[in-house]
């Protein structure tokens, strides 16, 4: 996860899933799951975030995704 100062009054989240994640269906599923998990994590209003998906995202339990993102956001503060 990468965070940069943003110009928007609310946080924006971008999700990147490259071909290493798998087929187009798996990449889209990974992006949908990460977007939903990011909606549950408290984000700073003055930041824009980029979440980069790995292979584990498509098969990991949803609670683990939320935990991973929460940890990543806390480390970036």
Image: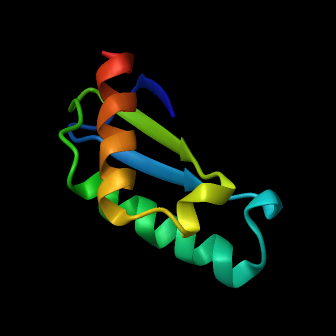
Classify the position of the C terminus by image quarter.
top left
Q: In which image quadrant can residue 7 be found?
A: top left
Task: Tell me the residue at 23%/36% (across/down).
Answer: 43
Residue plotted at (54% across, 76% down): 29
**Residue 8 x %, y %:** 30, 37
Identified at 40% across, 35% down, the residue is: 48
Give the image location of residue 74, x and y in percent. 29, 23
Residue depicted at x 45% and y 72%: 32
Residue furthest out toward the bottom:
25
Image location (x, y in percent) of residue 18: 75, 58
Q: Of residues 71 and 12, which is closer to you in this image?
A: 71
Which is nearer the eye, 57 or 39? 57
Q: Determine whether, in the image, residue 16 is placed left or right of residue 15.
A: right
Can you say whether 51 is above or below 18 in the image? above
Above-or-below relation of 53 to 21:
above
- Total numbered labels: 0
| Rendered position, 54 above or below 5 | below
Provide residue 56's location: percent of width, then percent of height.
60, 57
**Residue closest to the far right:** 19
């Amino acid at each position: 996860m990468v965070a940069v100062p943003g110009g928007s009054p609310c946080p924006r989240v971008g999700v990147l899933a490259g071909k290493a994640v798998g087929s187009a269906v798996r990449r889209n599923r990974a992006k949908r799951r990460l977007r939903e998990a990011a909606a549950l994590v408290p984000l700073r209003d003055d930041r824009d975030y980029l979440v980069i998906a790995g292979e584990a995202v498509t098969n990991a339990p949803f609670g683990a995704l939320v935990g991973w993102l929460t940890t990543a956001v806390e480390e970036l503060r």
